[in-house]
Amino acid sequence: LKPGVTAKEKFRGVNDRLRTLQKKLRRYIPKKAENPQERWYILAHRSGGSIFGAATAYLKDIDKKIMSFKTEDAAKKEADRINKKTRSANVWYTVTDMPPSYGGIAENPDWHPSGSSDIAPGYFINIYGAPKLMIGYEFLQYDRPKWDRKLSHLHPHYKLIVLHGKKKQAFDYWGSRSDYDIGKKTLSEIELIEAFIMVLEDIGASKMTLKEFSLEYGYPTKAAGKKVWNACKKVHEKWKKLNYRKSLNNLIDNIRDHYDI
């Protein structure tokens, strides 16, 4: 220390010089990024069930600029509107408060929601209104339907696969004779959804008595309808193993409303 300068004064001078240096350096320090809570964004998701593969991207406007919203409610309202308009199990929209500049989901400017004709075997799509349910299929062979082996013509035979969480069950699904005539071995998204609805309706039918079932589906006698009724009961037993406990009627209504079928 210099004569007449106290330790306190010495450190005060050091602090002053540090503050001056900090002010000079501040101009070279990037400004603090905007708080991600101040803006909300919409993410467009494409499932692996699409022939284009899975993808996620920030939703853009017509000028290819990422859309942003001041509030979460505004973003959710727009996402809900697009979900209802899109009506696709392969494409859906959610909201996020993480902007692209924060290194979140990689931006893909070339991606846009796109419909597909058929879904490749082995891919799965989500069920609208039931996020833990997924469905896919496999083509087995051309064969005569189990309910009538005497038929001379063949039908495409598929295995409809339903996933619920970690549980998995397979159900038979048969295409039409015309599908066989054109060599069809794949299902479109709507065809896959309709096959799933048929499984759900078989489950509902299994809850009827044999008499009710025969009258409802036009069998002249209980004996005539018993074989199909028993087949519906087997479908129901498989479904129980998936441990899906919500209303099947509501599930069917939601799917039909979403796909307008």
Image: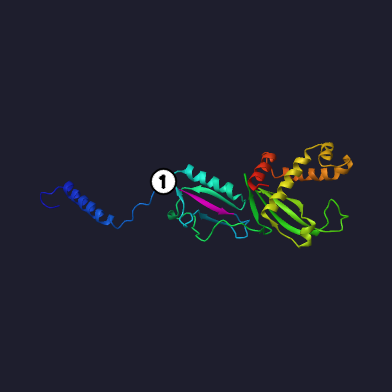
The amino acid sitting under disc 1 is: Glu
Query: Outermost residue toward the bottom?
Result: 183
Q: Secondary structure at mark 1?
A: helix
Q: For residue 242, what is the image quadrant?
A: top right
Residue 123: % across, % down: 65, 57
Q: Residue furthest left?
A: 4
- Residue at horizontal 63%, vertical 60%? 51
Q: Nearer the viewer, residue 105 or 71?
A: 71
Question: In the visual, does 113 lie left or right of 174?
Answer: left
Residue 223, given in percent of the width and then of the height, sits at 89, 41
* Viewer-nearest residue: 54 or 66: 66
Task: Examine the rendered structure and indicate whether residue 158 appears above or below residue 218.
Answer: below
Q: Main secondary structure of the magenta part?
A: strand
Closer to us: 31 or 64: 64
Locate residue 171, reporting x and y percent: 75, 50
Q: Which residues are magenta?
A: 36-46
Q: Which residue is mark 1?
A: 38
Q: Residue at x 12, y 53 (%)?
A: 2
Is the residue marked by circle 1 packed among few (<14), some (14-19), or many (20+) residues within 10 Å? some
Q: Residue at x 70, y 55 (%)?
A: 137
In the depicted structure, whether residue 214 falls above or below residue 116: above
Residue at 71% in and 48% down: 196
Decide if residue 227 is in sight here. yes
How many numbered callouts?
1
Q: Nearer the viewer, residue 5 or 180?
A: 180
Q: Position of residue 66 (x, y in %)?
A: 46, 54
Asked whether residue 44 is drawn in magenta, I would say yes
Residue 165 shows in this picture: no
